[in-house]
Amino acid sequence: MTTATQKPSANANSSRETPPRLVPLPEAPHTTSPVPWLTSIHATPGRGDYGDAGYRGNCSGLLIKDLLRYYRPKRVLDPMSGGGTCRDVCRELGIECVSFDLTAGRDATASGAFWDQGLFDFVWLHPPYWKMVRWTDDPRCLANAATLREFLDRLRMVVGNCAQVLRPTGHLAILMGDLRHEGEYLALPFRTLNIAYAENLVLAAPEIIRFSHGTTSARHKRYSCSFIPRLHDVCLVLRQRPKSAGGTRAA
Ligand SMILES: C[S@@+](CC[C@H](N)C(=O)[O-])C[C@H]1O[C@@H](n2cnc3c(N)ncnc32)[C@H](O)[C@@H]1O
C-alpha cells in the first residue's frame, strides 16, 4: 500500500488543516493483466504529451493509453476528438485511429454518422459534460443543448451511432464528468450509463474513477461559498449485451 505522509495538524478541527497530498490506494489483486496498474482508480498524474494540451476540455492521454494496451484493438474510433489526444496515443502505439469532431465538420449525432467507416474494436468517446465548456455556436454541439433532456437525447444518438460500428467483441469507453446546474448535481455519469443500457450495452469493467490531474486552473480558483469539490470524472467501459442475456433496460 502507498502510504500518506502528512504532518499532524495542531488542531484537528481547524479548517486550515493541510489535506493529505498522497492518497493511499487499496491493494490490488495480482492478475494476468498486461496492464497490472490499471484498476478502477486511475490516479496517474499528468496527461502525457498527447494532443493539444491547450484545447479546452481536453483529457489526459494516460488512461486512453492504459485502456488501449489492455484491450489491444486494431482499429479505434474517436468521434469527438477535440485536440486529438486519442489520435496521438494511437499513433504512439501503432494503432489505426479514425477521428472526427464537429469542429472539423462531422456531426456525431447524425443518423448513421460512422456507417461508412467500417467496424472498430474500440471507441473512445469523450463528449461535452453538457454546458461546462462552450466550443462554438453550432446548435449541433452537445454543449449547446438548451435543456438537460435535449443533451441526453443527443448523447444517446451518439452512443447509438458508436454502438452501430462496434465489432461484437469491441469496447466503447465513455469518459464523463458531472456538472452542477442551478444548485443540483446532475449525475451525468449515471445518466450516461442508463443511456448505454438503453442502447444494449453493458459494463465490461468496473467504472473507472479518473482523478482530474492536469486541470491547472483548479487550484488557483477561489469561491466565496462552501461545497465539496469534484476531483474526478468517470470512465465507463462498455460492450454489446450478449444476445442471450436479459438484464436492465433503462432509459
Ligand atoms: C470534451 S471535448 C473532447 C476533448 C478531447 N478528448 C481532447 O482530449 O482534446 C468534446 C468535443 O466534442 C465535440 N462535439 C460536441 N458536439 C459534437 C457533435 N454533435 N459531433 C461531433 N463532435 C461534437 C466538441 O467540439 C469537443 O471538441
Image (cartoon, helix red, strand yellow):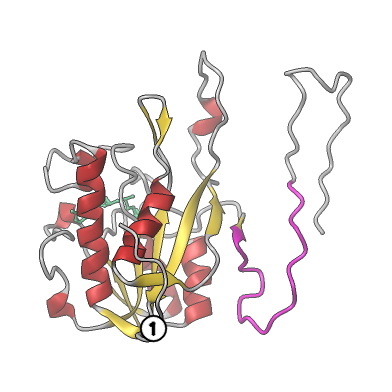
Query: In the rendering, at what x and y percent does residue 249 appear?
Result: 34, 65
The answer as to whether callout 1 falls within 8 Å of ligand 1 is no
Query: In the rendering, at what x and y percent does residue 31 appear?
Result: 70, 80
Q: Nearer the viewer, residue 170 or 214?
A: 170
Q: Nearer the viewer, residue 52 or 3?
A: 3
Q: Residue at x 40, y 58 (%)?
A: 193
Tell me if residue 53 can be seen.
no
Relative placement, left or right, of 38 versus 101 is right
**Where does the N terminus fall, quadrant-wise?**
bottom right
Quadrant for residue 38, please give it: bottom right
Q: Nearer the viewer, residue 113 or 216?
A: 113
- Find out whether residue 25 is within the magenta segment: yes
Residue under label 1? 242
Relative placement, left or right, of 136 versus 190 is left
Q: Residue at x 50, y 37 (%)?
A: 216
Outermost residue on the top side: it is: 224
Quadrant for residue 197, please give it: bottom left
**Circle 1: residue type:** Pro
> Measured along the vertical axis of the image, is residue 54 above or below residue 97?
above
Relative placement, left or right, of 244 versus 98 is right
Q: Residue at x 55, y 25 (%)?
A: 227
What range is drawn magenta here?
23-41
- Find out whether residue 126 is within the magenta segment: no
Query: In the rendering, at what x and y percent does residue 139 appear?
Result: 11, 43
Q: Nearer the viewer, residue 28 or 246?
A: 246
